[in-house]
């Protein structure tokens, strides 16, 4: 089974937009971390667009939470958006919807992150 994670980075004003596509699992964690670690540690304003995600394993849900906490601690803002329904259901089951900032659309997420 081939594991692939596609990451595209864009800018929307002062907000960094990270678009994820494919599978986020143990085989692709390093790629995700190399993108997110610098952003969260410097307190950037970040939107993670999850529209293209097809799978997220449990370790990676923990990373979502880790980067959220790091970003806030550094004075930044991290907002997740466009989460596919099956992944959103797991986020709710894990209770992460109470700690993660989640928006329905990219536009809404950019507005929240930028404010």
Image: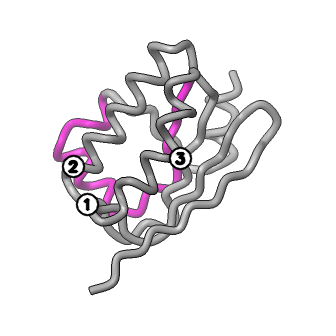
In the picture provided, is 115 more to the left or to the right than 59? right
Mark 2–mark 1 distance (CA, rounded to whole Å):
7 Å
Callout in the foreground (3, 2):
3
Per the image, label 1 sits on a secondary structure element best described as loop
Q: Quadrant of residue 25?
A: bottom left
Residue 74, percent from left and from top: 51, 14
Q: Which residue is mark 3?
A: 35
Question: In the rendering, which numbered label is found on residue 26?
Answer: 1
Callout in the foreground (2, 1):
1
> Which is more N-terminal, label 1 or label 2?
1
Per the image, label 2 sits on a secondary structure element best described as helix
Q: Which residue is mark 2?
A: 59
Question: In the rendering, which numbered label is found on residue 102?
Answer: none
The one nearer the camera, 61 or 105, is 61
Q: Are marks 3 and 2 in contact (CB under 8 Å)?
A: no
Q: Are marks 1 and 3 in contact (CB under 8 Å)?
A: no
Mark 1 Cα-neighbour bin, 10 Å: few <14, some 14–19, many ≥20: few
Residue 9, percent from left and from top: 67, 53
Residue 95, percent from left and from top: 21, 36
Q: Are marks 2 and 1 in contact (CB under 8 Å)?
A: yes
| Residue 19, magenta (yes or no) | no
Mark 3–mark 2 distance (CA, rounded to whole Å):
16 Å
Per the image, label 3 sits on a secondary structure element best described as helix
Q: Which residues are magenta?
A: 77-98
> Which is more N-terminal, label 3 or label 1?
1
Looking at the picture, the colour scheme in use is one colour
């Amino acid at each position: 089974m081939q594991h692939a994670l596609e990451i595209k980075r864009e800018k929307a004003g002062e907000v960094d937009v990270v678009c994820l596509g494919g599978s986020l699992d143990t085989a692709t964690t390093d790629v995700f971390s190399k993108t997110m670690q610098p952003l969260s540690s410097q307190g950037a304003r970040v939107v993670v667009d999850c529209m293209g995600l097809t799978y997220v394993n449990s370790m990676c849900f923990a990373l979502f939470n880790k980067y959220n906490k790091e970003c806030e601690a550094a004075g930044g803002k991290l907002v997740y958006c466009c989460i596919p329904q099956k992944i959103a259901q797991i986020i709710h089951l894990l209770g992460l919807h109470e700690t993660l900032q989640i928006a329905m659309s990219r536009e809404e997420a950019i507005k929240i992150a930028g404010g």
